[in-house]
Image: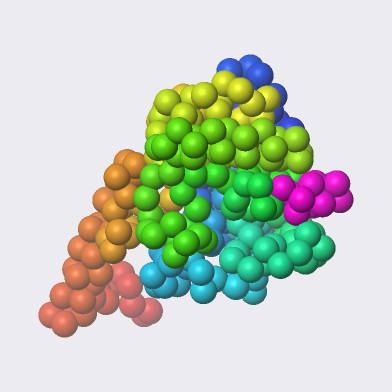
Amino acid sequence: MPEQTITAPDFIKMKERGEKIAVLTAYDYPSALIADAAGVDAILVGDSLGMVVLGYDTTLPVTMEDMLHHVKAVSRAAKRVLVIADMPFMSYQISPEEGLRNAGRFLQEAGAAAVKLEGGGPVVETVARITSAGIPVMGHLGMQPQSVHQVGGYRAQGREEEAARRMLSDAKALQDAGVFAIVLEVVPMGLAKEISDSLRVPTIGIGAGPDCDGQVLVLHDMLGLYERFAPKHARRYAEIGENMRKAISDYVEDVRTGGFPGEKESVK
C-alpha cells in the first residue's frame, strides 16, 4: 500500500483485488506511531483496552470518555492508516439516534475515520442510521465481548446449523445497511469462508481461519505484553513483556548497587 491515507472504501477495493487486509489494535500515541510505520492498513482502537490497558475483567466497564481519550491519542499519531473507534457497551444499544450521536463524537472530537459496532439484527437499524449520516461503520459478528454474560463466556459462535444460518443472514443485513467491513471473531473457519465468499465487503477475522479477507490481532497479545489471558487464536510475534521485566530488573539492580547513574549519565 502506498504512503497515503487509507479510507474505508479502500477496504472494499482491496477485497476486489484479492489483497489481504492487516488490522491491529493500538491504544496510545507511541504504539500507533509504530503500527502506522510498520505498514498495517488500519488501527482498531478496541474496547479491549478495558482488559489489556485499564485492568478490567471484561470490556463492559469501558465508557465513551475512556474510548474518546484513547482514540484521540491514536489519531494524533496515525498519518496513513484508517483509525477505527470501537463503540463501547451502551453507547449505541439504546436507540439509533444515540448511536449516531456517539459515533459522530468519535469523528468530530477524537479524529477517527470510522466506528465499529457489535451485533447483527438488533443493530442493523442503528448501523443504517450511522452510515446514512456519512460515518463509515465496521460490523462485528461471532463472539461479541459486550455480550459475554448473555452467551455464557468467551466461546466460539456459529457451530450449530441454525446459528450459522443466522450469522450469514446477519452479515448480509449488515452489508445492506452499509458497513464497509465485518469482523468475524472466533467463528468456525468453514462458516467464515462461506460468509466471506458471499459478501461484497471484506471480512476481518480473529480466530476465524485463513479464508477471511483480512486479520486483526490485539497488540498486547501479539507482543506478549498481556499475561492474564492468552487467546488460542493469537500468535505471539515477540516477548516484549519479558524483555521489559528484564530491563526494569536490571535498572533496579544498577540503582541499588550504584551502577546507575554513571559518569556519562551525569551532568558535569
Q: Is residue 243 left or right of residue 71?
A: left
Q: Which residues are magenta?
A: 124-135
Residue 26 is one of the magenta-drawn residues: no
Residue at 29% of width from left, 45% of height from top?
232
Spot occupied by residue 46 in the image (x, y as percentages of width and height): 54, 56
Depth order, front residue of 245/163: 163
The N terminus lies in which quarter of the figure? Answer: top right
Q: Residue furthest right?
A: 133
The part of the image, by quadrant, that contains residue 82 is: top right
The part of the image, by quadrant, that contains residue 186 is: top left
Spot occupied by residue 255 in the image (x, y as percentages of width and height): 21, 79
Q: Is residue 172 left or right of residue 108?
A: left
Spot occupied by residue 63 in the image (x, y as percentages of width and height): 60, 73
Depth order, front residue of 32/229: 229
The C terminus lies in which quarter of the figure? Answer: bottom left
Spot occupied by residue 5 in the image (x, y as percentages of width and height): 71, 39
- Taking the image as drawn, is residue 131 in sight? yes
Q: How many marks?
A: 0
Residue at 16% of width from left, 75% of height from top?
253
Residue 126 is one of the magenta-drawn residues: yes
